[in-house]
Image (cartoon, rainbow, N blue to C red):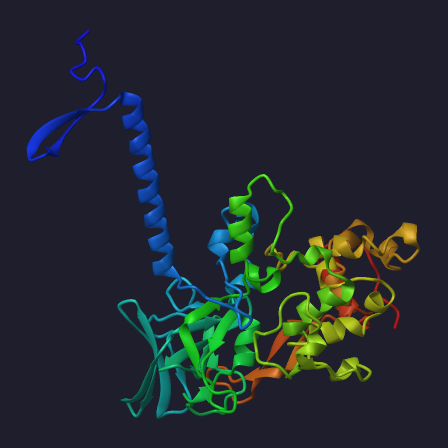
Amino acid sequence: MQPSLFPMGPVLTGFFNGKMKCFWIHRRLFITVSILVASVSLLVTCMNKKSDQAPAIKTSKGELFAGSEVCATCHREIYNSHIHTAHYLTSRRASAKYIKGSFDAGKNEFSFDDHVKVVMERKDSNFYQVAYSNGIEKVRKPFDIVVGSGSRGQTYLYWNDSHLFQLPIFYFTSKDEWANSPGFPHKVIFIRPVTSRCLECHFTFAKKISDPQVESEEFDKSQIIYGVDCEKCHGPAAKHVEFQSENPTIKKAEYIINPAGFTRKQMLDLCGLCHGGRLQKTQPSFSFEAGDPLSDYFAIDTSARFAPNIDVHGNQFGLLAASKCFNYSQMTCVTCHNTHENERGRTELFSQRCMSCHNPEHGNFCKLSATIGPAIKQNCIDCHMPEQTSKAIIFLEQGAEVPTAAVLRTHLITIYRDETQKVLGLMKKNSNIPGKPLKK
């Protein structure tokens, strides 16, 4: 075997007192120093990368956000699941990954009449809505922000300096086509402003920089956290991350909010922030924090709820609160919804949760169980929480003269006899049950 040229380890050369000298380094010391240098280099690289990706963002109370990517370091499984939820995807920077509508010729236009149309155009990695009148370009605005996961539809925002405006055309998922944005008149408008209250339900945080007395709101582009992220429900986490990193043996989570320990009211207030209808804020947007009383930040309507007047969009809590299931139990929104999972469309899963309370043992099982048979376990939802048209989300489809109303699932849990007849008829048609029609 060839003897080592450096039995004591590598040799370093350098100048000492003006003369070149050789310095022998013990092999073990050399390895230790090398690892230390590499570790420091990696740490600096990661810190610089994080700094490039997201500048420090603080809440209105001065608490520092960590960012969900940091949460993933210790909570990887939950993070990997949560990033597929409608909550997480409810706002994103506009990109080909998140914009659902087509930019292909023949599929990228919405015509208001024979002379005026808006065309969705792509140039390199940028996307635009461009208004044309008689073939002449009049207005061109970029897709800067995507709002909505796309499960039902998406709307889009653009920046004008530090102001945000909504684009006139949105994407209607069920028809896979572009349509006139809900609430817009049937003409091209690019100047519909977006408020902080709008952002509060679709973003974890957005810093307002305009004077509170000025109606036209302005925002800091660098101080935005997209989506309903980890820190929307668990609070700003930088202090938590710092503490747990410095104290890895302490298993109790410090400086973080855990909604699992909330009272029923705290949990309902947290969900009600965005699913409680049109709330009149009494404090600045984004000042509410998970666990706070909602009434400290909004004027709450304490009058009796009349379910027929509550729209299926935006006030799921109001509808749920008008349900017997809610009023005769201690249920909250998370009784049925796992906010860390994308469970959309899994009617059998939700039905199993219904049956955790409604079962033969409790004497309150569905009276149609004998008629329907085992299939009863697959779908309680379409009978007792059917999809209904919204009076709030109305828009005009391409070429239509009559506006279209969005269809959303109601959260008023009750008996809908007509809907039940439809479900039974469909099940019978598919030979799932030998059932007979319900008696009115």
Name the quadrant of the N terminus: top left
User: Visible in this render: residue 74?
Assistant: no
Left-right relation of 70 to 289:
left
Q: Which of the 4 image quadrants contains residue 288?
A: bottom right
Q: Which of the 4 image quadrants contains residue 273?
A: bottom right
Say if 192 sits above or below 71 in the image: below
Q: How many marks?
A: 0
Left-right relation of 271 to 140:
right
Closest to the observer: 99 or 382?
99
Closest to the observer: 28 or 171?
28
Residue drawn at (81%, 52%) of the image:
356
Name the quadrant of the C terminus: bottom right
Picture coordinates of residue 116, whole percent (x, y): 36, 91
Say if 8 sits above or below 440 in the image: above
User: Visible in this render: residue 46?
Assistant: yes
Picture coordinates of residue 86, whole percent (x, y): 56, 63
Left-right relation of 86 to 164:
right
Residue drawn at (88%, 56%) of the image:
365
Closest to the observer: 354 or 77?
77
Picture coordinates of residue 102, whole percent (x, y): 39, 70
Closest to the observer: 376 or 158?
158
Left-right relation of 274 to 368:
left
